[in-house]
Amino acid sequence: MLVDSIQKYISLYDAERYLFEVLGPKIRENGYITFKDFYDICMWKSARQKQNYLKNKDVVEEITRKALNQSDEIDRINTLRQLKGVEIKTASAILTIIFPEKYAVMDERCLDILIDYGFRISKYPTIKTWIQYIGIMRSLAKENNVSPRELDMAFFAIHREKLEKANFKNLY
């Protein structure tokens, strides 16, 4: 019995690899997100809204199907925000897992690094900020021959290095 499930748990060990290499392609193929996959993605991004995420069992497939069929960026993210517990940052994580070549996770660490590099962008997650953020990330990704997702990964690492150099002062 253990041998049958060990490969499953090995694949689940690296949550990001599982989300991006298994769930993302599966969701693209299906055109919607199952509740279990939605829950896994949201808990990876932020566990704080766990109780709200659980309230989406009956609507997640319908809402995510609608969101993924939207062509307008604002409509797409606003449709995802209809899910309980999902705001801009979590919606950006959902989109990034499904379309890493097009999206980047919006996070205060990434915004902080953009500001450090001289970009004039708000730290507050509004639709306007998200549209500006995704535009900047796509442009920088193209200039550096990486995907927006790879760029946000680099920004997370740059931010971690920044905190280490400051002995983790002002940790969130």
Image (cartoon, rainbow, N blue to C red):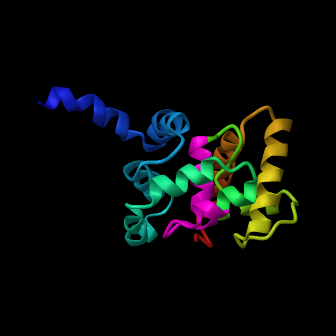
* x and y percentages locating residue 5 in the rendered image: 21, 32
Image point (79%, 70%), residue name: 122
Q: Main secondary structure of the magenta part?
A: helix
Q: Quadrant of the C terminus?
A: bottom right
What stretch of residues is rendered in magenta?
78-98
Work out which residue is located at the far top of the displayed protein and give it: 3
* Position in image of residue 162 (x %, y %): 68, 57
Give residue 102's position: percent from left, percent from top. 71, 42
Q: Residue at left 73%, top 62%?
A: 111
Q: Nearer the viewer, residue 156 or 81?
A: 81
Look at 81% across and 63% down and name the residue there.
115
Q: Is residue 166 visible?
A: no
Above-or-below relation of 62 to 98:
below
- Left or right of 126? Residue 20 is left
Residue 85 part of the magenta segment: yes
Left or right of residue 172, residue 48 in this image: left
106 in magenta = no
Q: Can the viewer see residue 62 in this picture?
A: yes
**Residue 101, horizontal then vertical, whole percent:** 69, 37
